[in-house]
Image (cartoon, rainbow, N blue to C red):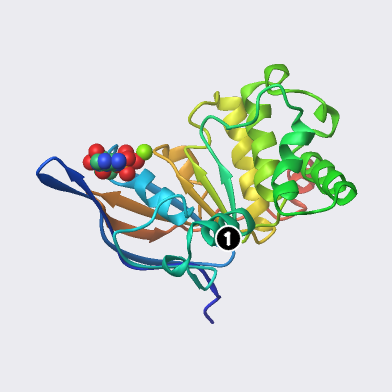
Amino acid sequence: MTRPAVIEVSDLRKTYQQGDSEVHAVDGVSFRVELGDYVAIMGASGSGKSTMMNILGCLDEPTSGTYLLDGVDVRELDDRALARIRNRKVGFIFQHFNLIARTSALENVELPLAYAGVPPAERHRRAVSALTQVGLANRLGHTSAQLSGGQQQRVSIARAIVGEPVLLLADEPTGALDSHSTAEVLELFDGLSVEGRTLVVITHEDEVAAHAKRVLRMRDGRIESDRRQAAVADPPPCWNRLEAAG
Ligand code: ADP
Ligand code: MG
């Protein structure tokens, strides 16, 4: 049984004019990402990851090829429609969090709902719920300056999930974090994946990619390999007790 595709790209290309020469940043890429999948996109610097991420997030348009986001052909949309679909369908998580300074965690998480026209009371309720889910129920009024890097990234994860987008798109989400905060973020991603969310994570870290169900590797604007990873089986629930009993 095939699940519905959240992402479906065919022969996608992005070409930059660089003086007299052309740079093929994305050079004929086709793949689909099914609902509920957890995909890491890896590749060396310059391989086309950011260009790919910008296209998948409707922040940039391809030169040619097609991109269906949740069944919608984004090439047919004008700028306003593109901004709307981006706000509704994609939750972004960036390396440097991109939170609004001097603004509380709660207000940061409410903001995408405000853009979407959600009434204030519901906005508040949903933002509190999202911040609770990332373990920050006791930090609602804190601003970025009052939060650690790991906590700021958790606020940004809450902001990404609060609108129930069909796609979570993360660009080097642990690139600015220490190992402890990295582990926390990866644990949250695992939980979101178990909930059935669809995640695409751009990363150059093996540790991050190891959590994904599937790894796409890019090289010179193309997909060099596409591998599904064996799931790490959870120990049975009685495992701890068995071990304790010897
Ligand atoms: P990555 O994120 O994997 O490091 P990028 O998508 O940023 O790769 O870049 C892919 C290629 O496209 C590189 O050769 C880069 O120099 C080129 N490139 C990216 N953005 C532009 C741009 N705005 N103008 C010209 N060339 C660009
Ligand atoms: Mg990049």
Residue 203 in the image: state x and y as whole percent. Answer: 43, 41
Q: Nearer the viewer, residue 60 or 134?
A: 60
Q: Look at the numbered disc 1 and say if its residue's Cβ is closer than 8 Å to ligand 1.
A: no
Residue 149 higher or lower than 163, as above or below = above
Residue 66 in the image: state x and y as whole percent. Answer: 37, 69
User: Visible in this render: residue 24?
Assistant: yes
The residue where tag 1 is placed is 85
Crowd rating for badge 1 (residues with CA inside 10 Å; few <14, some 14–19, many 20+): some
Residue 95 higher or lower than 74, as above or below = above
Q: Residue furthest left?
A: 20
Please state the total of marks drawn on the protein image. Answer: 1
* Quarter of the figure that contains the C terminus: top right
Kind of residue indicated by mark 1: Ile
**Residue shown at 38% from the left, 44% from the top:** 50
Residue 224 in the image: state x and y as whole percent. Answer: 26, 56
Residue 154 in the image: state x and y as whole percent. Answer: 67, 35
